[in-house]
Amino acid sequence: MKSRIYFLVLVLAALTLSCSKEQEEENTYPTSGLVSYFNFDDNLSDQMGYIPAGTNNGGATFTAGQAGKAITFNGSNQYIDFGERTFKSGNNISTSVWVKRTGNAGLYFIFSNDFAMFTHADGYAGMAISIPGTTNAHGSLTKDVWTHLAGTYDGTNIKAYINGVLAETKPWPGNIADLDETFKIGMFFNEFWSGSVDELFIYNKVLSPAEVEQLYNYHK
């Protein structure tokens, strides 16, 4: 009887540790390869310190986000400019963001030297890479609803994830072109995006499906 009691205690302890580990993973985000992280909680600062705080052009506002606050754009004259920055390592890059599109226009809402994230009026969103010649992978996105969007590129395939699930893989081998562009949120070539952006992570590696799911669970 005593051995059975000990066995039961050990099993319960193992289950407790397992549940604690799962809960801990849900409450954290991957840090390996993380270059920049913006939580937009009343600030435009990179929590990793890689780049200076962005310049708020047109008065984009902080509103209720998926977690804490988000940065919100009116679609007419507001955008954030962080200057010219490179995030990739070789041809490896990944990004994760919560987004809520409120306008009808389709547009790149994040644009940089390395990658772009977009929403489209037809109800999809994804990641674009210039190789040169631009291609993208995308999935469905509902207007006025917070959606988790992630994208990865490894020099061969570009992948888009919606709410932690792989939506599309598109072969596109090549080297990421340097577009000589500043890193902006809310504007693409004098066109302005309407919606909110929250919890932006940028990595210089290829996130695994498990890591994408972890980022989704972090603030779902």
Image (cartoon, rainbow, N blue to C red):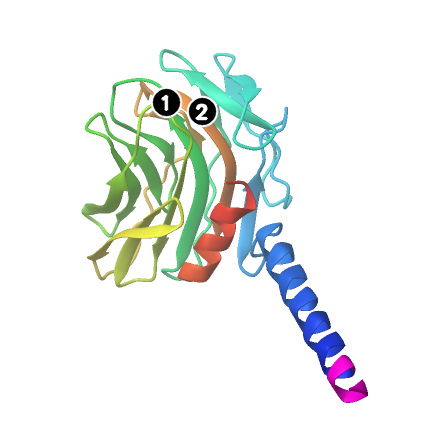
Residues shaded magenta: 1-5
Q: Which kind of residue does numbered mark 1 sit on?
A: Asp
Above/below status of 58 relative to 55: above
Q: Which mark is residue 185?
A: none
What residue is shown with label 2? 196
Where in the figure is residue 13, as x and y percent of width and height? 73, 71
Q: Is mark 2 on a helix, strand or loop?
A: strand
Q: Quadrant of residue 126?
A: top left
Q: Which residue is outermost to the front?
A: 1
Question: Which mark is in front, 1 or 2?
Answer: 1
Decide whether the magenta segment is chiefly helix, strand or loop: helix
Mark 2: few, some, or many residues within 10 Å (few <14, many ≥20)?
A: many
Residue 27: where, in percent of width, then height? Answer: 62, 50
Q: Read off the residue under disc 1.
A: 144
Q: Nearer the viewer, residue 37 or 16?
A: 16
- The answer to whether residue 205 is left or right of residue 169 is right
Whether 159 is drawn above or below 39: the answer is below
